[in-house]
Amino acid sequence: MVAMSACAAATRVASAARARNPTKASSSNRAGSTVAILSGGSNAGTVGRSARFQRGDPAASSVLRQRHVCTSISQRACGKRVVSASATPATVKAAAPAEWKGAKLKPLGFSVLAGLIIWLIPAPVGVTAQAWHLLAVFVGTIVGIITNPLPLGATALIGLGVSMCLGILPFAGAFSAFSSEIPWLIALAFFLARGFIKTGLGNRIAYAIVSIFGKSTLGLCYSLVFSEALLAPAIPSLAARAGGIFLPLTKALCVACGSDPEKGTEKKMGAYVMMTVFQTSCVSSGMFITAMAANPLSVNLAAATIGQTISWGTWALAASLPGMICLISVPLILYVLYPPEVKDSPEAPVKAKEELEKLGPMSGDEKIMAAALIVTVGLWIFGSKIGIGAVAAALVGLSTLLITGVITWKECLAEGPAWDTLTWFAALIAMASYLNKFGLIPWFSQTVVQMVTAAGLAWQPAFLVVVLLYFYSHYMFASGAAHIGAMYTAFLSVLVACGAPPLVSALVLGIFSNLMGCTTHYGIGSAPPFFGAGYVPLPTWWTIGFGLSVFYITVFLGVGSVWWKLIGIY
């Protein structure tokens, strides 16, 4: 208050001075305005009054004295307020600790610990230190992929980096699988799926399926399962069949029914449908020689080992009954163990028909997408006869979509799951292939042969032991073809040496080379695209995979053995 009164008094004195000498007041105002422009308003007033004071103006002298009093009082008052504010601890907030933005440390610790334990264990006799150390890095990477301290692609790249820094793999070896067909085929399938959904063709087909089978989620699931099984013998690439056709169709169907992981509704029906279609794709690929690219390799190796050629009809007949039981049973088993939240929707067919009417006739982009898909699928079926492989066929379809503008390259670059899957899948394939090159897999096969032979078991228990070891060793492989190439001949030779029927042994190992892909999210060509859709958590994927693997083995060795006896295979 004192400060305000002093300032007011100074203002009245200045006004009186201007009234007594208006000429000087006007001149001082002009000078003050000029200085204000150059150096600020308050300084301008002070400079003007200082000039008048030097000329002996008593009024200006009074104003300056009052000004100094006002400024002094204001500064003291301001100082008190600052001291008061700084003395109040409640107004001072402690800085929040910086939040950790990196990897999840506990899962990362598990990954490092798993690899370190194997690293510190001395390598067994017959295994080189290089192979054993690569196994340590491989196991650590797998544990990291399971516990997920970082995104899968980042975890896999770290694994490759560790193997290179430790001198286990050269650059060419660590990144060798990036020139492999399967990872790129899976990535291309994601890009095709983008166009399938973007154009609305996926929704159109999905609504058509829902209008026929949509009264229940189980009915929808069976329609997809048997559609995939019917196409299986015609499309020899499981990655192309699953990723290029049934992943986009299944995803479009789930999204059309309101189940989308981006919206937190994946359990509504999508998680159940995705898991079921993936699992049954492992069954259907094992039912026909032409349903999986590596099946002919099994046939060739069997012919070289036992001197018998497995015909297309013999394989299909042997797998038909146990395979059909699995195709029918798996949707029911998962319906109980991993049920969808929405099971019955009687109104769904009506709503689907209404949505189809709203869509109207096919757009130009839909027609281009449909044509590109037909050409791609046709090349997947018949391309081998004219020298066009699965990846080249997928590139034909993708090129068509890019040239016509149905999808853009920016959209392909933004397809994160495609690049992530390409990265981690190629990394695992590279490490697994070098485990074989470094001699670890052959050592494992020979050890099993020696153990079973030394045990002197009858052929039936020996058969069970060898088959189980062959099946569950697939956790170390990211490719069915790699597993077959590394272990099929050795294990078939053991079974024949133990007295098991040669043809049955060859067929079981060949069929199981497909079924064993059910266990992980990287073990077979259909796993990465379906897992990459984001509907099923990784622990759930592995748990269900192991449980159904027991079911498949039981059905094929139980029902299958009786069936094979009836049809005269042994």
Image (cartoon, rainbow, N blue to C red):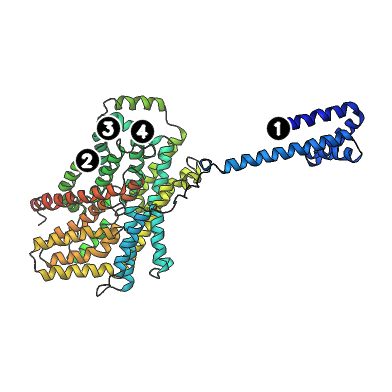
Say left or right for 391 vs 409. left
> Which residue in the structure is indicated by mark 2?
331
Of tags 3 and 4, which is closer to the observer?
3
Of tags 1 and 3, which is closer to the observer?
1
Is label 1 in a helix, a strand or a loop? helix
Q: Amino acid at mark 1?
A: Val
Q: CA distance from mark 1 to mark 2?
A: 88 Å
**Precedes in sequence: disc 1 or disc 3:** 1
Q: Amino acid at mark 2?
A: Pro
The quarter of the rendered structure image containing the N terminus is: top right
> Which residue in the structure is indicated by mark 3?
342
**Precedes in sequence: disc 3 or disc 2:** 2
**Precedes in sequence: disc 2 or disc 4:** 4
Is label 3 in a helix, a strand or a loop? loop
**Based on the displayed image, in which of its 4 quarters is residue 175 positioned?**
bottom left
Residue 315 at x, y percent in the picture:
19, 53
Q: Amino acid at mark 3?
A: Val
> Which residue in the structure is indicated by mark 1?
2
